[in-house]
Amino acid sequence: MIKPSHFLLPALGALAGCSLAPDYKPPEVLTPVAYKEAGPWGLAQPADDKPRRDWWKDFGDPKLDALEAQIDSQNPDLAASLARYDQARAYVSEVDASMMPTVGLNASATQNRQSAKRPLRSPNQPNQYGANTIGLQASYEIDFWPIVLAPYWLGW
């Protein structure tokens, strides 16, 4: 016999996904086209993707040009900073690589020989035989801490 209580839990589960709240509509904010306090200021036009020019050549000093050329090649502080930057990028690459699955492949090929005095050896068994193997291993470690800490991070 089917009881009404058997339908109660699935019905409540189906209704749990229903929202009775009205659709959210963000408020309209009117922004002016220009401000009266703007003065001579203008919109920024970043040019970080464009090559920079040699600004020191504006002074027209050949000695300054020679010194600027030496900075790139003979500055130990700059070379050390570049080495530390390369080391940090390599470390970040190493940490990122640990988040990926690992795959291992191994193989072995051996030629074996049976003893003529082996017990229970039949006469039709070969004296020599190969034992060739190929192995493949894949592993991935799931990090459960983001799942555990997600409610804390999201403020639930």
Image (cartoon, rainbow, N blue to C red):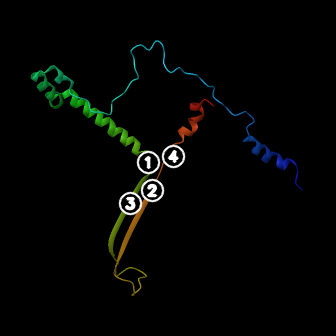
Residue at the image position 85 percent from the left and 47 percent from the top: 5
Tally of numbered tags: 4
- What residue is pinned by disc 1? 100
- The alpha-carbon separation of the residues under discs 3 and 2 comes to 9 Å
**Image disc number at residue 8:** none
Kindly indicate whether the residue at mark 1 contacts the one at mark 4 (C-beta within 8 angstroms).
Answer: no
Q: Is residue 54 left or right of residue 18?
A: left
The kind of secondary structure element at disc 3 is strand
Q: How far apart are labels 2 and 4 at the CA level?
A: 13 Å
For disc 2, the neighbor class at 10 Å (few under 14, some 14 to 19, many from 20) is few
Contact between marks 3 and 1 (CB within 8 A): the answer is no
Q: Residues within 10 Å of mark 4 (few under 14, many from 20)?
A: few
Between marks 4 and 1, how big is the CA–CA gap? Answer: 10 Å
Q: CA distance from mark 1 to mark 2?
A: 11 Å
**What's the distance in space between the residues labelled 3 and 4, CA to CA?**
22 Å
Name which residue type carries label 1: Met
Instruction: Please state the horizontal and vertical placement of residue 111, each as a whole percent of the image.
Output: 32, 74
Pointer 4: what residue? 142
Residue topped by disc 3: 105
Please identify the residue farthest to the right as the structure is shown.
1
Give the percent coordinates (x, y) of residue 54.
20, 27
Amino acid type, callout 2 = Ala
Which is in the foreground here, disc 4 or disc 1? Answer: 1
